[in-house]
Image (cartoon, helix red, strand yellow):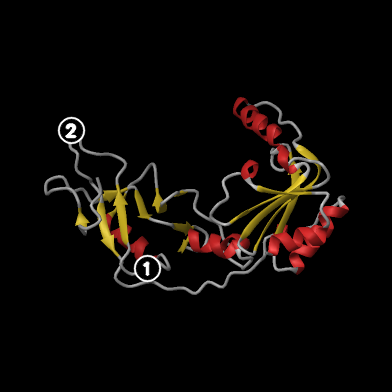
Amino acid sequence: MRNNNKIGHLAPKGYRVNLFNSIEIEGDYHYCQSHNFIFNSVVEYQKLHLGLPCYYTDKRFRSSRYNFYKNCKIYWTRFKDISLKSSIRRTLNCYNIPVGTIVHFDKSWSFSGKKFSTSFNFKIRKENKIDIQYEVSKDGYFNNFSNCDFSKQLTEELRKNGFLVYVEKNESFLGNMINSAISLSGGDLMDTEIEGDVAIAYGHNKIIGFSSFKNDLYGYSNGCDNILWDVYGEFDKWSRCNEISKNTSIEEIVEILIS
């Protein structure tokens, strides 16, 4: 087990090996691989639900695929371990790791029969600061519905009232699941596109989802006849959201969502 109160090698003398295959941080941090900085995912999600520019609205940034819940990896390798000196250098070169953060240098192996951790704990004593100015630049935030007048007008009204609305082509949820299985067997993929579009909107501390016509929303049938929405921090999945009938006027829908 890790001991966050101890800095340096966690293994006793005689078992310390200065080779590591990952550098990681516990907590709500994620790593931006394209620009080499750490960001707080909870803070960025809060900004998104307030309709503000944030990490998730900016197309310039690409995350590491090793950002897991309560654990982000600045570095990971399967084939070649890196030295302690290299691990420290990579950590110090990474931007925006807060002062006092404990960074773990880990190994993918352990000593047989030994229960101690072979990690090395490194404490950040000076932050390598970079100021990130986020913008709304992902293409979907400028798209609109192509052939559903109701959804198109709703998108325009939501944007006028401070919501960020991301619109993309609708696809069959079941078809995508089938394609995932087909891709493993090397078969020909099926066409998953459905007529119309879907949208996810953020703003006023809410998340909202709606689709063209009577189509489902990402496979959820309650999205066929309803606008689905929930409050930040309470969203679980679309089938458990609050519902507003698509028969409701656009003015009434917007009034409900900004309240």
**Horizontal and vertical percent position of residue 251:** 81, 62
Task: Count residues near mark 1 (Cα–Cα under 10 Å), then give few for <14, some for 14-19, many for 20+.
Answer: some
Q: Name the element at disc 2.
A: loop
Q: Mark 2: which amino acid?
A: Gly
The residue shown at (11%, 49%) is 13
Classify residue 167 by image quadrant. bottom right
Residue hosting label 2 = 113
**Horizontal and vertical percent position of residue 198:** 75, 48
In this rendered view, identify the residue nearer to me: 115 or 154.
154
The residue shown at (71%, 31%) is 189
Rendered view: 140 above or below 182: below
Rendered view: 59 above or below 239: below
In this rendered view, identify the residue nearer to me: 90 or 217.
217
**Measured Cα–Cα span from mark 2 to mark 1:** 36 Å
**Horizontal and vertical percent position of residue 180:** 63, 32
Tell me the mark number nearer the camera, choosing from 2 and 1: 1
Q: Name the element at disc 1.
A: loop
Rendered view: 126 above or below 240: below
**Residue 98, disc:** 1
Q: Mark 1: which amino acid?
A: Pro
Task: Count residues near mark 2 (Cα–Cα under 10 Å), then give few for <14, some for 14-19, many for 20+.
Answer: few
- For the question of whether residue 142 can be seen, the reply is no
**Residue 5, disc:** none
Side (left or right) of 234 relative to 243:
left
Q: Earlier in the sequence, mark 2 or mark 1?
A: 1
Quadrant placement of the N terminus: top left
